[in-house]
Image: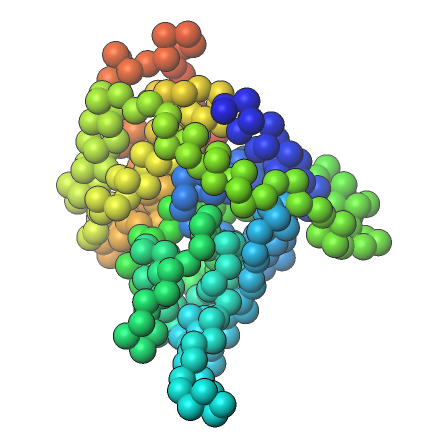
Amino acid sequence: MLGELHGCVQRIAANVERVLVGKPDVVRLALVTLLAEGHLLVEDVPGVGKTSLAKALARSIDCTVSRVQFTPDLLPSDITGSSIYNRQENDFEFRPGPIFANIVVGDEINRASPKTQSALLECMEEHQVTVDAHTYPLGSPFMVIATQNPVEMEGTYALPEAQRDRFTARVSIGYPDPQAELAMVDEHAGHNPIDDLRPVSDAAQVLRLIETVRRVHLSPDVRRYAVELVSATRRLPELRLGASPRATLHLVRAARAQAALAGRDFVVPDDIHAIAIPVLAHRLVLTAEAQAARRSAAELIRALLQRVPVPQAALDPSAQFVRNLGTNNNAGTPR
């Protein structure tokens, strides 16, 4: 099954990289989030490809896809759906909203009011929608890919802590290097490459790959290491709010997906290190003193990765464990 996973992931990544040029680490994190049954928050300044990443990933999988443009006047029922009176039946019938899809692209999520943002809370955590006391299940797989602009920009509402905590990972795309930007100009100037994308996988195959990831072995030592790392965030004096138990679950699921993408059926501490910043940083709330000192959540997590002891018994015996905390500079907290 790992062979099928590796081949499928390569096809999807190649498809997405036709649109998002020069950002393989960002694409990989998006695929890790998909296989971890999570949701992805893409935060960066306008024009760097946030929506293109979301739409390219959605088009690469042959499943139901919907897109919601978040605006200040958007209502919760515009997302979840509402009950409409049917004169012929003399009763109310439920009209599903765009949330009823396998992949939901939420564009500029923080331009809607907190009331509308909260419409996603039940959907993302419980994979269901409750309208007028009736509960409707969502399909599988189900993934929300939301984009947001930095909170300092005009016309944005900061996502509540409960909303951020439901996103498995946050990624910052960043500006491309000159060579990648030149290649983008050559390829994108004449037409939009998203129009040429064709599905290279389907929902049934994605579900099989998710089941493969669930079976990736997680030793007691690595499990304990993940718990200790997340628990350490709750004791940092620079934080008003540390990572939640949900963050621990998301960290473990993402580590399993990271290991599977590396071709292993077991998790090593290196997998935890690779995804710790994108999974944990957006959940942390800094104190006013830490913000004044220009500390960042990503910086604090890097320091924890250096301090929390790594279980030596959990290291991969077939390869040397090397700490490379600077490899995920595109996936950390935007500066």
Q: Which is nearer the eye, 269 or 120?
A: 120
The residue nearer to you, when weighing 206 against 225, is: 206
| Quadrant hosting residue 158 | bottom left
Judge whether residue 235 can be spotted in this image: yes
Q: Residue 72: percent from the left, percent from the top?
A: 46, 77
Left or right: 168 with respect to 182? left
* Figure quadrant of residue 233: top left
Q: Position of residue 249 (x, y in %)?
A: 28, 40
Residue 154 visible from this viewpoint? no
Residue depicted at x 70% and y 42% = 18
Taking the image as shown, residue 202 lies to the left or right of residue 236, namely: right
Q: Is residue 162 above or below residue 69?
A: above
| Location of residue 111 in the rendering, given as x and y in whole percent from the top left corner | 47, 70
Instruction: From this view, report whether residue 34 is shown above or below residue 41.
Output: above
Note whether 295 is above or below 265 in the view shown: below
Q: Residue at x 63, y 45 (%)?
A: 60
| Identity of the residue furthest to the right in this view | 190
Which x, y percent locates residue 228?
Answer: 19, 31
